[in-house]
């Protein structure tokens, strides 16, 4: 967590996303079942707009933390379509 703190002190606003992403990659190495194919599909779709992402907590459907590269990238993530195959018809 020290590196995360240092990035904020240095006003490096991309750094926290990078550090969060590193943490997410470690989670995935420790537990291959950390994310579902549906979650990975979302990550793959919005990843160009992000500096980092993570599923915080112990699992079970909480939420996804996404850190956008900038304000425009954050707005762009809101325009991605919802996976229609996951919705009931």
Image (tube, rainbow, N blue to C red):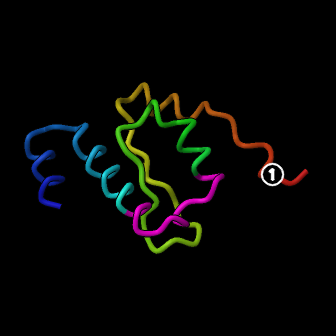
Q: Is residue 38 magenta?
A: yes
Q: Is residue 32 magenta?
A: yes
- State the residue at coordinates (61%, 59%): 36
Q: Is residue 19 left or right of residue 11?
A: right
In percent of the image, x 38 and y 55: which residue is there? 25
Could you tell me residue 1's position as x and y percent? Answer: 18, 61
Which residue range is magenta in the image? Answer: 27-39
Farthest right residue?
89
Residue 52 falls left or right of residue 43:
left
Q: Is residue 52 above or below residue 32?
A: above
On the image, the x and y values in percent for residue 3 come to 14, 53
Q: Give neighbour class at mark 1: few <14, some 14-19, many 20+ (Cα, 10 Å).
A: few
Q: Residue at x 16, y 37 (%)?
A: 12
Image coordinates for residue 8, horizontal then vertical, percent: 15, 46
Is residue 37 left or right of 86 when viewed as pictured?
left
Q: In the rendered image, which residue does mark 1 sit on?
A: 87
């Amino acid at each position: 967590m020290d590196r995360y703190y240092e990035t904020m002190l240095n006003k490096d606003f991309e750094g926290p996303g990078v550090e969060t992403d590193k943490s997410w990659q470690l989670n995935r190495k420790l537990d291959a079942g950390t994310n579902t194919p549906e979650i990975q599909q979302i990550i793959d779709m919005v990843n160009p707009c992000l500096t980092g992402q993570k599923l915080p907590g112990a699992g079970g459907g909480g939420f996804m933390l996404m850190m956008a590269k900038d304000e425009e990238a954050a707005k762009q993530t809101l325009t991605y379509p919802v996976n229609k195959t996951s919705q009931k018809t």
